Amino acid sequence: MPMDSNVIFEEALKLPPELRGKLAAGLLESLDDEVDEGYEEAWTEEIQKRIEEARLDPSSRIPWEEARKMIMSDDDGD
């Protein structure tokens, strides 16, 4: 009998943060059947671009607490 995904999720939330991270990474990796050859280079370029933008315009930065609230309450109806 298969386990209910909600039960699995609730049990996973009881794990220590380090193990939850490893579990999340493993689950995400399991979804990638095909490797995108240029992804790492593209992400590195994007990160560098964002760092430079933040340096040039410090007023564009959002404190983590505010960003987290925005992420957690993202309720655009999709």
Image (cartoon, grey):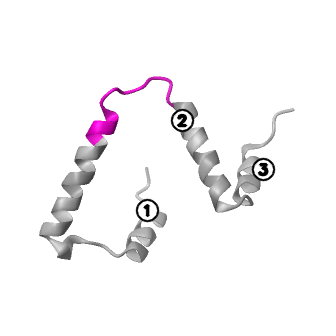
Q: In the picture, which quadrant includes the N terminus?
A: top right
- Circle 2 sits on which residue? 29
Q: Quadrant of residue 57?
A: bottom left
Q: Is residue 51 magenta?
A: no
Q: Position of residue 11 (x, y in %)?
A: 77, 54
Q: Which mark sits nearer the N-terminus, 2 or 3?
A: 3
Q: Amino acid at mark 3?
A: Val
Q: Main secondary structure of the magenta part?
A: loop
Q: In the visual, does 7 lie left or right of 43?
A: right
Query: Which amino acid, mark 2?
Result: Glu
Above or below for 64 versus 32: below
Q: Residue furthest left?
A: 56
- Which type of secondary structure does the marked residue at label 2 adopt? helix
Estimate the spatial distance between the alpha carbons at disc 2 and disc 3, rounded to whole Å.
Answer: 22 Å
**Three-letter code, disc 1:** Asp
Label 1 secondary element: loop
Nearest to N terminus: mark 1 or mark 3? 3
Badges 1 and 3: C-beta atoms under 8 Å apart?
Answer: no
Q: Residue 19: give x, y in percent of width and height.
A: 67, 53
Residue tagged 3: 7
Please state which of residues 25 and 7 is positioned toward the viewer in this rendering. 25
Give neighbour class at mark 3: few <14, some 14-19, many 20+ (Cα, 10 Å): few
Residue located at (12% from left, 68% from top): 56
Residue drawn at (54%, 35%), measured in percent from left and top?
29
**Range shown magenta:** 32-42
Asked if disc 2 and disc 1 are in contact, CB closer than 8 Å, the reply is no
The residue singled out by tag 1 in the image is 74
Can you tell which of label 2 and label 1 is closer to the viewer?
2
Q: Nearer the viewer, residue 30 or 3?
A: 30
Of residues 41 and 63, the one drawn nearer to the viewer in this rendering: 41
Residue 34 painted magenta: yes
Q: What residue is drawn where x is 60% and y is 39%?
A: 27
